[in-house]
């Protein structure tokens, strides 16, 4: 489930720093889209160049009323605001200069809207050569990238 797909924050910061090394004048800041406020806050503490929207509350259709989501019910205001926030985050990802994709379907949605000729890299594929290439194509079904096991792909979306 979601725990298995959790993004490794160290790996994400390393990828951001790779972009900064390869393009020192271009990537002075990064935007972190995530449904986990604590991860966003912790990443900002580790790297001041990371930014995020503090009041975003992503609504997960698949977790909206499950026991393991911590919320057994939601009112319509929560659903509307959470849905709007989720689409706002997708819009930011689509408009980003370069998209670092984690194992999130929202990241792949942004990838497909942007087109595969835009700057993008999958987090587990964030090597210096791929970052320098900027345009990396991922032709497989995104479900395969999102749900591959930890040992196959590696450990939120950014930029």
Image (cartoon, rainbow, N blue to C red):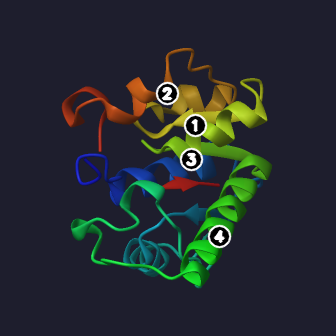
Note whether 99 is above or below 54 in the view shown.
Answer: above
Q: Dot 1: within a 10 Å radius of its alpha carbon, few (fewer than 14), some, or many (20 or more) residues? A: many
- Tell whether label 4 touches label 3 (CB within 8 Å): no
Note whether 6 is above or below 105 in the view shown.
Answer: below
Q: Which mark is residue 85?
A: 4
- Mark before the other along the chain sequence, 4 or 1: 4
Residue 97 pos. (x, y %): 77, 48
- Mark before the other along the chain sequence, 2 or 1: 1
Q: Residue at x 57, y 64 (%)?
A: 32
Disc 2 is placed on an element classified as helix
Q: Residue at x 70, y 44 (%)?
A: 98
**Residue that badge 1 annotates:** 108
| Image-based side of 22 in relation to 96, left or right | left
Quadrant of the rendered structure where residue 144 is?
Answer: top left
- Tell whether label 1 touches label 3 (CB within 8 Å): yes
**Residue that badge 3 annotates:** 106
């Amino acid at each position: 489930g979601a725990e298995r797909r959790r993004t490794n924050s160290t790996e994400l910061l390393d990828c951001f720093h790779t972009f900064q090394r390869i393009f020192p004048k271009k990537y002075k800041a990064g935007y972190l889209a995530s449904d986990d406020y604590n991860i966003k806050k912790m990443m900002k503490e580790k790297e001041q160049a990371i930014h995020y929207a503090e009041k975003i509350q992503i609504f997960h259709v698949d977790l909206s009323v499950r026991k393991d989501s911590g919320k057994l019910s939601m009112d319509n205001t929560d659903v509307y605001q959470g849905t709007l926030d989720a689409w706002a985050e997708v819009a930011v990802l689509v408009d980003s200069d370069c998209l670092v994709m984690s194992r999130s379907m929202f990241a792949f949605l942004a990838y497909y809207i942007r087109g595969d000729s835009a700057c993008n890299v999958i987090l587990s594929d964030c090597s210096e050569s791929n970052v320098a290439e900027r345009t990396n194509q991922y032709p497989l079904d995104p479900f395969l990238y999102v749900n591959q096991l930890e040992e196959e792909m590696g450990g939120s979306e950014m930029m």
